[in-house]
Image (cartoon, rainbow, N blue to C red):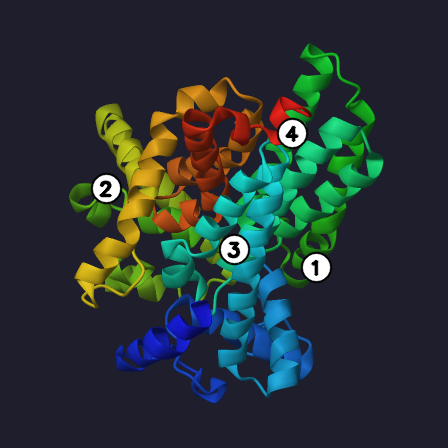
Amino acid sequence: MHLWFLFAVQLPHREQKGEAYPGTGAFHIKLLGDEGQFALMAYHLNQGGVYSLDGRTPTALRMPLFPLAAAAVFRLSGNNALYVIIFNCLVAALAALAAYRLCTLFWSPEVGLAAMAVVGLSPYTFDCFVNFCCEPLFTVLVTLSVILLVLMTRRGSARYAALGGLATGAAALTRAEGALLIPVYFSYLAYLYLFRGQKTLSISLVFLALALAALAPWVIRNHYSLGYWGLSTMSGRVFSGAHNRRLLDRHPGSWGHFRTYAPEEEQQAVKGLSEVQFNRYLWQRGLSTLKAYPLSHLLRLEAMKLFNTFKPSYRIFPKGYHEGLNFLLTAPYFLLYLSFLVFLGQTLRSPGRVLLLPLVVPVVTSLVFWGTIRWRVPYEPVIFSLALASWFHFLRPRVALRGGGKGL
């Protein structure tokens, strides 16, 4: 279905869009927006082994795992971006399989099969995943990380702790906000040790060591190449892009590029800054802007951000394209998502509540930066799995429980 959508809908619509990202004419298809940066990084990795946008100057704008995977596909396909999108279609299928495994940790195979079908055909896997982007890979790694978290706490196994640390570190190497999973999971393991009497001390240390070890080469590389102790220099652009007077006065909770809100003289003044210096400048600019607003406005801003991320909105086709069909296909997901919110109290009282832990990441990311459904999409396999389990428990309670209630 994803491949059909790619060739029947996405590629024709892509060619009708505006100007492509500069410098991406060699990738066989038109690339738009963020796709261009990922493609250029993959191209220069493939051609010269340099993680760069221009082949000369090192960059830390984007996390490295997806560009590395894309570079491997480029090596086999002659820098054809279409094959990277096909690769993403295959990764989307892995997300569905991961949802099945996630469900069967707590509930019956019937719930797992339902989750696999729902996640595999969920709306934003078409609208978002069938692109030259890192979201499919990030989604799989997030789901894998929570699966391994459950397994390591149940079995007390250092092997699962090590795999969990590597999966969580890999998620952070795909999208920077994935690094928040490390303190979230580690805090949960510490809670089990301190307040529940579980012997999780050793596995928590193994998990933390392997997660940090996965991140260490990237951080060290950034230090030696850019003089930057951090994961991504994109953070300042996103923070300032959401916290400037143009948006805070008119569209709180939105985001804009620097050129859309900074006056011409300011744009000229920062042209000489390095990538790291510009990142720091934008952080300071955003913080200075926020200080000028009253607390009541900032509270409204945070509420708008959360709404923009978690609003029950779904889309398969591009805007203006088969709107009626889009409504019919997404309506079941709209209702399923609402049921997740309705059954949230029940979920908090069930063993499956541990699956809510990854949702801390889109909440924090929205509150700090801005609100967008893209922050929520990688966690929808968890959301849909919990919603389906609640429905199975409500309609067929004996079937819902894994092994009739064993192993919970």
Query: Do the CB atoms of the residues marked 1 and 2 lie less than 8 Å apart?
Result: no
CA–CA distance in space, label 1 to label 4: 48 Å
The amino acid type of the residue labelled 3 equals Thr
CA–CA distance in space, label 2 to label 4: 48 Å
Residue 2 position (above or below residue 370): below
Q: Which mark is residue 221?
A: 1
Counting residues from the N terminus, which is met first, the one under dot 3 or under dot 2? 3
SS at mark 3 in the image: loop
Picture quarter with the N terminus: bottom left
The amino acid type of the residue labelled 1 equals Arg
Seen from the viewer's position, the closer of residues 349 and 257 is 349
Q: Which mark is residue 252?
A: 2
CA–CA distance in space, label 3 to label 2: 23 Å
Q: Nearer the viewer, mark 4 or mark 3?
A: 4
| Residue 285 coordinates in the image, percent (x, y) | 36, 46
CA–CA distance in space, label 3 to label 1: 13 Å
SS at mark 2 in the image: loop
Number of numbered callouts drawn: 4
Q: At 33% from the left edge and 66% from the top edge, which residue is drawn?
A: 268
Looking at the rendering, which quadrant does residue 146 occupy?
top right
Looking at the rendering, which quadrant does residue 310 occupy?
top left
The amino acid type of the residue labelled 4 equals Gly
Disc 2 packing (10 Å; few <14; some 14–19; many ≥20) = many
Picture quarter with the C terminus: top right
| Residue 343 coordinates in the image, percent (x, y) | 39, 25
SS at mark 4 in the image: helix
> In the image, is 131 to the left or to the right of 371?
right
Q: At 28% from the left edge and 27% from the top edge, which residue is drawn?
A: 299
Q: Nearer the viewer, mark 3 or mark 2?
A: 2
Q: Which mark is residue 108?
A: none
Q: At 61% from the left edge and 30% from the top edge, which residue is drawn?
A: 402
